[in-house]
Image (cartoon, helix red, strand yellow):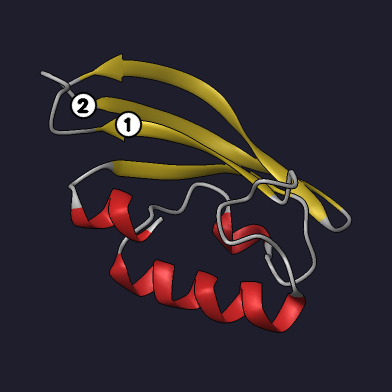
C-alpha cells in the first residue's frame, strides 16, 4: 500500500467488510493520511494491510502509466458491518 502511494497511484476503497473499518472508508482515497490510519487499524483489529483476506476492495482510478483518470460518482450502501460503493457513473477525465 505504501508503494502505491509513493508511486502516485490513485486508489479508492470500493468496499469494506472488516471490524475497524466504518462506512467512512467506502469511497475514500488512499493517501498518506489514510494509509497511516489503515496501518493502525490493521494492527489493532488484526486484518491484512493489503486487504488480502477480503477485508476491503479497491479500484485504481489514476496511475503514472494511465493517460486519463477515472472519475467515479456513487453512493455508499452500508449493511450492518459492511458496505460498498454503488457506482452511479464513471467517466474519464
- The residue shown at (21%, 33%) is 63
Query: Residue 55, how many percent across, how many down?
Result: 72, 51
Quarter of image, res 61? top left
Query: Residue 3, how many percent across, how many down?
Result: 30, 54
Q: Is the Cβ of the residue at disc 1 closer than 8 Å to that at disc 2?
A: yes
Q: Residues within 10 Å of mark 1 (few under 14, many from 20)?
A: some
- The residue shown at (75%, 76%) is 45
Does residue 2 appear to the left or right of 13 in the view shown?
Answer: left
Q: Nearer the viewer, residue 57 or 92?
A: 57
Against 30, residue 36 (above or below) is below
- The residue shown at (56%, 53%) is 50
- Which of the image's four quarters has the C terminus? top left
Q: How far apart in space, not on screen, are marks 1 and 2 (Cα)?
A: 6 Å
Q: Earlier in the sequence, mark 1 or mark 2?
A: 1
Q: Nearer the viewer, residue 77 or 70?
A: 70
Q: Which mark is residue 69?
A: 2
Q: Secondary structure at mark 1?
A: strand
Query: Residue 16, how many percent across, how many down?
Result: 69, 50
Q: Residues within 10 Å of mark 2 (few under 14, many from 20)?
A: some
Q: Which mark is residue 61?
A: 1
Q: Secondary structure at mark 2?
A: loop
Against 2, residue 13 (above or below) is above
- The residue shown at (74%, 47%) is 53
Amino acid at each position: 500500500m505504501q508503494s502505491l502511494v509513493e508511486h502516485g497511484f490513485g486508489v479508492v476503497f470500493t468496499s469494506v467488510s472488516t471490524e475497524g473499518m466504518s462506512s467512512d472508508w467506502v469511497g475514500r482515497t488512499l493517501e498518506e493520511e489514510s494509509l497511516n490510519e489503515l496501518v493502525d487499524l490493521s494492527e489493532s483489529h488484526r486484518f491484512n494491510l493489503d486487504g488480502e483476506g477480503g477485508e476491503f476492495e479497491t479500484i485504481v482510478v489514476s496511475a503514472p502509466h494511465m493517460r486519463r483518470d477515472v472519475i467515479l460518482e456513487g453512493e455508499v450502501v452500508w449493511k450492518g458491518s459492511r458496505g460498498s460503493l454503488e457506482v452511479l457513473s464513471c467517466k474519464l477525465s
